Amino acid sequence: MGAPTIPFIHALRFGDLPDDVVAQARQCMLDLLGVALAGRQTALSRIACDHAVEFFAPGRLRARLLFDGRVASPPGAGLAGAMTIDSCDGHDGHAQTKGHVGVTVLPALLALAEQCPGMSGREWLTCLVLGYEIGTRAGIALHASACDYHTSGAWNALAAAALAARLLPLDARQTREALGIAEYHGPRSQMMRCIDHPTMVKDGSGWGCMAGLSAGFLAQRGFTGAPAITLEQPETQHDWRDLGERWRILEQYFKPQPVCRWAHPAIDAALNLKRRHGFASGQIRAVSVRTFHHAVRLAHAQPATTEEAQYSLLFSVAVALRHGVVDFDAIRGEALTDPEVLRLSQLIRTQEHAEFTSRFPNERIADVSVELLDGRRFDSGPTQAAGDPDRPLGAVAIRQKFRRFAEGVCEAGLAEELENCIDELGTNDAPVAPLLDLVTDRIRVAQTTQ
């Protein structure tokens, strides 16, 4: 294979990681754990975790489920963990992949670390970075080489397989087979079908995590796979040549709001107008949003479930205009029937802007206009969402988001302990086991049926 992928998987060491990459890995992990805590309140997470325990029973190998306390096989634990994170659409992502890798990397690594007693915090961080580097490049390469727009599980499965190859460990030949199996069996599901008809299938990352982990265990036993075209075809070699030089983990965006990233430019534009001009939601007569094509498809004005709300630009912008913030509690349960939010949601009009569409996915832009009952009109101008690498949230904002998501889901002491453990990761060669115990312990949460 021409690309340096396999040597990178097995040879990367903590000392190879620049300081900013290590810091970013810690931030990614804290952010993902906050999203997972919020996600544990959902029916999606409950169903996925129960499914893993019942139908992915542990054999010789066992892994604890994320924030659940029960055990399953490693692929089952990975499935449940990725679905739990995916159930709250607040996790990090990458513009060019049009999707997410951390949602699979963290649960896959957690399931595999259970099989590696004595793993250090430094090795954990190294593996976390490895997953982001392999997964992000696989996503970019697959989008460039496939005719359909597929979910994240189609390519983040390769990240899980790469982690399995490193930690089981597999030899070079088995690693190649594992990557090929993962790509072949990864869920090549159509993303826009879930956008138009939002359900619990979400972004396919649970299946991607399960497929990638299974690929590693299959390859270990001699199972063979078709070559991974994202890695091996000549047209994608340029995506892999800079491994260890260009760190794709630094290019991830962080979401302030737990809804589809495509809605964020419009949400930020609406929030900016509300802060700047101080109007109340009851004063609003009309709202118009001009944005890129994919965001216009987020068109569920009256969502019946939290999945529909997370994929609704109309509803999330209405929440922003009503409350001045979009928290997870505002897009689930009884909040879905808020009369004022529904009034605003149904009066918002969206329109595709050709220039904004041409700049997607590298840039996601929206322009929002608000007209009040007294005739005043306010225009946001073209707005890019906060949280992109060139408009970062910053470490303080990410920590505040974690605390906000964890509040009411777990005890304050647990949240603080998680923060402290992550802050200490990599500062010495201490084992990661205490942190793993924290994130696999059972937490008691009030779950919604929606």
Image: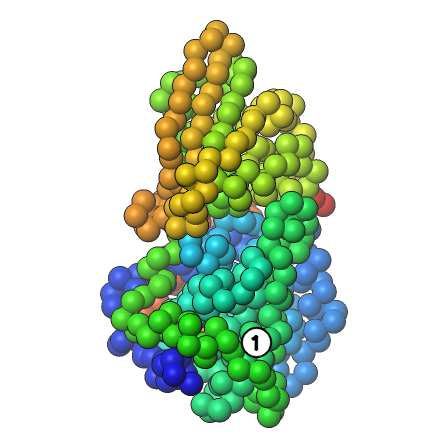
> Taking 232 as reference, is 131 above or below it?
above
Residue 435 position, x and y percent, is 45, 67
- At 53% across and 44% down in the image, what residue appears? 294
Q: Nearer the viewer, residue 71 or 269?
A: 269
| Image x and y of residue 193, in percent | 65, 51
Horizontal relation, residue 74 to residue 166: left or right: right
Is residue 271 at least partly visible in the picture? Answer: yes
Is there any visible trace of residue 130 in the rendered image? no
Q: Residue furthest top?
A: 374
> What residue is pinned by disc 1?
182
Residue at image location 38% in from the left, 83% down from the top: 2
Q: Nearer the viewer, residue 193 or 93?
A: 193
Query: What residue appears at the point 49 percent right and 44 percent down from the top-left corner?
Result: 262
Nearer the observer, 184 or 305: 184
Give residue 318's position: percent from left, percent from top: 55, 28
User: How many numbered marks have been drawn onto this rendered protein structure?
Assistant: 1
| 408 shown above or below 225 | above
Rendered-image quadrant of the N terminus: bottom left
Horizontal side of residue 382 vs 111, given as left or right: left
Q: Position of residue 332 (x, y in %)?
A: 63, 40
Residue at the image point whose x is 54% and y is 70% from the top: 157
Q: Residues within 10 Å of mark 1 (few under 14, many from 20)?
A: many
Q: Quick one: SS at disc 1?
A: helix
- Specify whether 39 is left or right of 231: right
Instruction: For the C terminus, give its image quadrant.
Output: top right
Q: Amino acid at mark 1?
A: Ala
Colouring mode (rainbow / by chain / secondary structure / one colour): rainbow
